[in-house]
Image (cartoon, grey):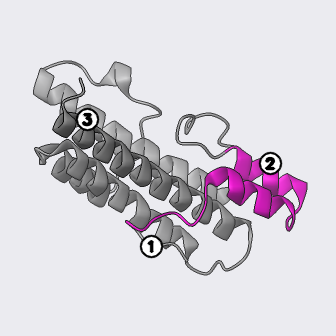
Amino acid sequence: MLHFGALPPFTFERFLQLCQEQIPEKDIDIIKTISRDSEYAGEGKQATLKKWYAFETALRNELVKIRASRKHVEAVRYLRREGYAEPSVTHAAMVAYRNPAVLEAEKMLDEARWRILEELAVGHYFDIDFLIVYACKLMILGRGEKIRSAEKARLLQETIGIP
């Protein structure tokens, strides 16, 4: 089990290695398409991934709308596949945007992502849907760990006077 804010038990790459020993190649191919860097590429036809990408797109679009309104520019050209955003998505984006601490705001957005993944996992145990949710959560934890470790390195450099 993964818990928000905890250290990831292993990397995404190690997770893929473990899965390759246990699940069919077609499912491995689906899991390999999951990436925080290319979240809009290759959505495929897998239902859980479609829901995940729809949420992620809605969240990012809401952030675009908020930022565009603050800068008095048209948001339309920056939106990706406009769709309906549930009020909870709009609220999560607004609360995170209003947080003056950037890292804390990112954490709030990741918590919103975690909640939707929890919802997507309901009723799934060890099937492809569960593995997709697990992979997405693992990436959230991995990102959080990178932020924590990078922050420590920066603080250490500032403390000892290294530019």
- The amino acid sitting under disc 2 is Asp
| Residue nearer the viewer, 78 or 130 | 130
Q: Going from the N terminus, do you reach mark 1 or mark 2 first?
A: 1
The nearer-to-camera label among 3 and 2 is: 3
Q: Residue at point 61% right, 61% down?
A: 10
The reply to whether residue 78 is visible in this rendering is: yes
Classify mark 3: residues with Cα within 10 Å, few (<14), some (14-19) or many (20+): few
Question: Quadrant of the image for the N terminus?
Answer: bottom right
Horizontal and vertical percent position of residue 157: 25, 35
Q: Do the residues labelled 3 and 2 touch (CB within 8 Å)?
A: no
Q: Residue 157 carries which label?
A: 3
How dense is the environment of label 2, judged by Cα within 10 Å: few (below 14), some, or many (20 and up)? few
Task: Count residues near mark 1 (Cα–Cα under 10 Å), then give few for <14, some for 14-19, many for 20+.
Answer: few
- Seen at 54% across and 68% down, the residue is 120
First of labels 3, 1 by sequence position: 1
Q: Which numbered mark, 3 or 1, is in the foreground of this view?
A: 3
Circle 1 residue: 3
The reply to whether the magenta stretch includes residue 30 is yes
